[in-house]
Amino acid sequence: MVKKNSRHPEYQYLNLLQDILDNGIWKISHSTGVKLKSVFGRQIRFDLSQGFPLLTTKKTFYRGIIHELIWFLSGDSNIKYLVENNVHIWDEWAFKKYDWAVKDGKAKKMTYEDFLVRIKADKKFLKKWGELGPVYGVQWRKWPVNKRKTVDQLGWAIEKIKKYPQKKHYVVSAWNAGCIYEMSGSHSASMVIAPCHTMFHINITGDKLSLLLYQRSADMFLGVPFNIASYALLTLMLAQVTGYKPGEFIHTFGDAHIYENHFAQVKEQLKRKPRPFPIMKINPKVKKIDDFKFADFEVVDYDPHPPIKGEITVVGGF
């Protein structure tokens, strides 16, 4: 719950939306041709002892957030787990990978609608074409060094924090130049999207664990509410498995933008008054990062305003 006589922390997000509307510079998305307003270099922060920052000025799809984070932590590159749990926020990127194969003459042309039908109904098809390449979870848990070796960045950080909490190098990066198509030049070896939430830094101060995320590109209306909740949840989980209290989640933005076709929705959201943040309850028996399951999480007292729909301009994982 928010302390009395304090400004609700959600206003940081709302004020950034207003900042972009008032001061943003016009740009054009190279991939879609859609105009957007953008600012560069901003930061917001949330004290996790004051509630879980699941935004309340519009309802947020927290079931998908939890499942996606579990998927990331598994180190998997296939959307099979998400599809089986009816979470489809990565389907379009799987289709993009399929479309690359079509252009390379390795697959038959198919509409996105037909692709979705096959993904949901055909396990063999899902196993083959649900692959996204070395995306976030792979980089976190199985960073490819060479054909014989991978590095578990997150596992390393957790074990080192238990022994040397004062060290300052607990950085986990998803930005691997050798796995980004524009630099690698290989569809087969590259991740399907260059990481938007690029890297995070874990810090121990006193008896609290905090996490700072750097996000190079931020779709403020659709994507960022998911990113805030996802990395706040990761902070809580890391605190639990390392034996610390949750500190802050600090969200640092590179290019923070609003697409022109979201302006009306953003203006509607800005009229709404934030409500108390919910509480995220986590099964206290879980002590290893790989042991978390969806049933270990419960969102309590979430009372958001109704959802505000917006067309997905540039689809990405949340």
Image (spheres, rainbow, N blue to C red):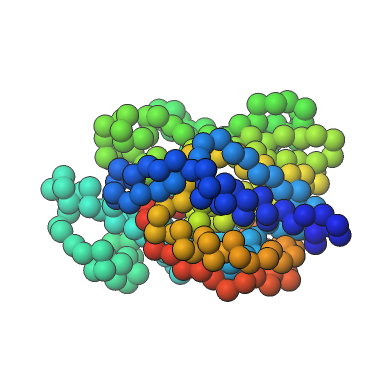
Residue 217 to residue 60: above or below: above
Viewer can see residue 105:
yes
Q: Is residue 237 left or right of residue 128?
A: right
On the image, the x and y values in percent for residue 76 come to 46, 49
On the image, the x and y values in percent for residue 26 come to 40, 43
At 43% from the left edge and 64% from the top edge, which residue is drawn? 310
Q: Quadrant of residue 203?
A: top right
**Residue 51 or residue 287, whichever sits in front:** 51
* Residue at the extreme front of the image, as rendered: 22
Viewer can see residue 192:
no
Residue 178 to residue 196: above or below: above
On the image, the x and y values in percent for residue 164 come to 76, 28
Q: Is residue 143 left or right of residue 53?
A: left
At 33% from the left edge and 55% from the top edge, which residue is drawn? 94
At 33% from the left edge and 51% from the top edge, which residue is drawn? 34
Residue 175 to residue 293: above or below: above
